[in-house]
Image: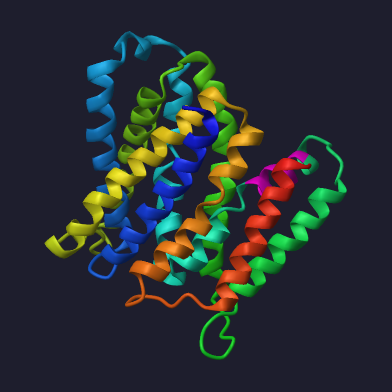
């Protein structure tokens, strides 16, 4: 299968996982959602790895790259994403979460001395306009608290940094399932440590049958998204894969309108804001 289809599968499964997680968050919290999804990731990804992948690849020094990536991606970035979904809703948080190419371009300009091109300039304006529009939703242009907006944006920033690391790692260990399994395991350890520290102050894990009914399929969906992006990065270029995988907000809007009508409302303002962000992401990715 071509890398473009893997990237498209990443977008769809990410959106599906977020919609299911939003349903589960009615009965639970973001910390529980992260731990549950990572546990499902590990069972699924290590199961496939044991069956089909030579595990002697674990001896490769390149595997340390995926351990390092796992310290913040997917665990911490997933927590930030789920907090954004919990506070803003899928139809608002997902477009903001898709701004990864903007941050990678801005970091290249600030840290690597690259020039601000015309496409990057206009793409930045489109994305800022989209975020501004999404930050004023509700019955009477109600402003969203700044910290809520920062959740998906910070997740996007960290994800952009991890894309490059994962691409380098796959050059040394070209096994997407194994790479995803290692990052999920590393993330789970960090997440459990965070939960243990936080549990001293308050209850952070809240699991019940109602939330589990949504977290289980959400975990499978996000596992498929993880594997898809690794296959896409392994076979294709980051500049091609990233914009396609960033179309998840379009899937999220459709799925939210179909399955989240009892939880959140997709308005024309949200649709326009999401489209502005996706247009900016595509512009900055394809013509920078």
Q: Is residue 167 magenta?
A: no
Residue 90 lies in quadrant: bottom left
Q: Is residue 79 left or right of residue 65?
A: left
Q: Identify the residue shown where x is 82% and y is 49%.
A: 119
Q: Principal SS element in the magenta part?
A: helix
Could you tell me if residue 35 is visible in this image?
Answer: no
- Tag count in the figure? 0
What percent of the width, then of the height, locates residue 192? 28, 45
Residue that protrudes farthest toward the left in the picture: 209
Vertical order, 182 against 222 (above or below)? above
Residue 205 lies in quadrant: bottom left
What percent of the width, then of the height, locates residue 29? 29, 63
What percent of the width, then of the height, locates residue 220? 28, 44
Q: Identify the residue shown where x is 29% and y is 30%.
A: 45
Q: Which residues are magenta?
A: 101-108
- Closer to the camera in the image, 149 or 251: 251
Vertical order, 27 against 228 (above or below)? below
Q: Identify the residue shown where x is 25% and y is 65%.
A: 28
The quarter of the picture where the C terminus appears is top right
What percent of the width, then of the height, locates residue 120? 79, 49
- Closer to the camera in the image, 89 or 7: 7
Could you tell me if residue 230 is visible in this image?
Answer: yes
Q: Identify the residue shown where x is 35% and y is 39%.
A: 224
Q: Is residue 42 left or right of residue 127?
A: left
Q: Is residue 102 magenta?
A: yes
Colour mode?
A: rainbow
Vertical order, 16 against 245 (above or below)? below
Residue that protrudes farthest toward the front in the picture: 1
- Closer to the camera in the image, 286 or 171: 286
């Amino acid at each position: 299968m071509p890398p473009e289809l893997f990237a498209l599968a990443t977008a769809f499964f990410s959106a599906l996982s977020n919609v299911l997680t939003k349903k589960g968050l009615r009965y639970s919290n973001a910390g529980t959602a992260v731990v549950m999804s990572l546990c499902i990731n590990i069972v699924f990804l290590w199961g496939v790895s044991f069956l089909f992948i030579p595990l002697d690849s674990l001896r490769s020094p390149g595997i340390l790259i995926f351990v390092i990536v796992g310290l913040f991606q997917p665990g911490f970035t997933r927590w930030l994403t789920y907090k954004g979904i919990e506070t803003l809703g899928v139809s608002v948080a997902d477009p903001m979460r898709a701004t990864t190419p903007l941050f990678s371009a801005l970091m290249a300009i600030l840290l690597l001395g690259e020039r601000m091109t015309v496409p990057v300039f206009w793409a930045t304006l489109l994305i800022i306009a989209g975020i501004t529009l999404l930050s004023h939703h509700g019955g009477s242009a109600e402003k969203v608290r700044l910290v809520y907006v920062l959740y998906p944006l910070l997740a996007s920033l960290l994800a952009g940094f991890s894309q490059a690391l994962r691409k380098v790692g796959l050059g040394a260990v070209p096994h997407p399932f194994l790479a995803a399994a290692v990052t999920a395991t590393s993330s789970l350890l960090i997440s459990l440590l965070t939960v243990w520290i936080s549990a001293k102050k308050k209850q952070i894990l809240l699991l019940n049958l109602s939330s589990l009914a949504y977290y289980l399929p959400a975990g499978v969906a996000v596992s498929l998204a993880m594997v898809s992006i690794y296959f896409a990065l392994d076979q294709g270029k980051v500049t091609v894969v990233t914009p396609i995988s960033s179309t998840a907000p379009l899937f999220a809007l459709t799925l939210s309108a179909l399955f989240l009508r009892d939880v959140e409302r997709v308005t024309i303002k949200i649709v326009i804001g999401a489209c502005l962000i996706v247009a900016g992401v595509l512009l900055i990715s394809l013509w920078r």
